[in-house]
Image (cartoon, grey):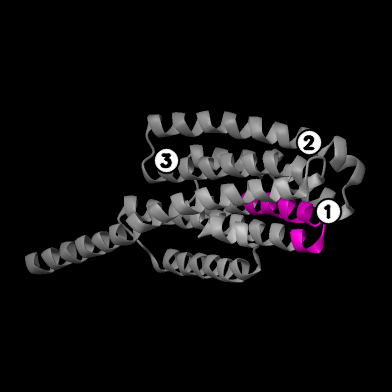
Amino acid sequence: HTGATAMGLRHKSIRFRVLLLVLIPLVSLIGVYSYAAAGSTRTAIDLARAGTIVDVTAKPTGNLMKQLDAERSLAVAYLVNPTSQGLTKFNEQQALTNAALKAFEGVSRSGPIAANASALEKSTAATLINATKGMPGLVGLRASVAANGITRQTAINEYSALVNDGYQVISQSVQKTGVSQSVVTTETQQANLYEGEQLLLEESDLYVGDAAARSFPPADRAQFAQLVGLRRFLVSEALPQLDSTSRSLYS
């Protein structure tokens, strides 16, 4: 019995070391993606020129996605280790997310978007607003996290669904720039790189949560592999279609 216990502990130790071996380069990769994607997004906005819908929507939408990403990470951290300090950080982040949401709502319901957006653009913006404002949307998700009444994987999936709604807003806005097709192609692929960054952050939250819990169950391994595969596909599709400036920035 003692030997079996020791063997089990060794297996857990080995598994945790493997987690760390993957986690360290993953965290480094997030920094690279964040730098490249942020630069690419700025380039896309510059290419589209001031006054276009993408120029008006990209910044507030991107900021809302950033705050949702941060809230998801803190939610995972709290679910792994539900301390009062963790809950305080989670609650503080909600205020930043709410401010970003308010800014996004202001842009979505006034100005160029209200006047010029297509029905699909308005629909994607409304989808994001409705998902974040109502029950059982963001409000219900936050309550479940605070009560520790939700699994880490479910929390990650639900936050990521909101982030994906934001990506759809940016994606639809790119199609309405009114500039040359080559610029639209570049912007579309830069948006795909930005989605790649979002997938990488989702990978990170999934992996960090499991590493902290010293567990990597089959369902999480499958989801992690799917995220990696999709991210790699987006990058492989995007890079050949970028202009030289954007490709150099990414490289």
Circle 1: residue type: Lys
Q: Position of residue 194 (x, y in %)?
A: 60, 54
Comparing labels 2 and 3, the label whose residue is closer to the camera: 2
Q: Which residues are magenta?
A: 162-184
Comparing labels 1 and 2, the label whose residue is closer to the camera: 1
Circle 3: residue type: Tyr
Residue at point 47% right, 44% down?
Answer: 73
Q: Residues within 10 Å of mark 1 (few under 14, many from 20)?
A: some
Residue at mark 2 = 107
Local secondary structure at mark 3: helix
**Magenta residue check for 72:** no
Q: Position of residue 193 (x, y in %)?
A: 59, 59
Left or right: residue 210 versus residue 48 is: left
Residue at point 69% right, 38% down?
Answer: 60
Q: Position of residue 68 (x, y in %)?
A: 58, 42
Comparing labels 1 and 3, the label whose residue is closer to the camera: 1
Residue at mark 1 = 176
Q: Position of residue 45 (x, y in %)?
A: 71, 46
Instruction: Residue 197: give its label.
Output: none
For the residues labelled 1 and 3, the Cα–Cα distance comes to 40 Å
Residue at mark 3 = 78
| Looking at the image, residue 139 lies above or below residue 211 | above
Between 164 and 86, the one lying in front of the other is 164
Circle 2: residue type: Val
Between 193 and 136, the one lying in front of the other is 193
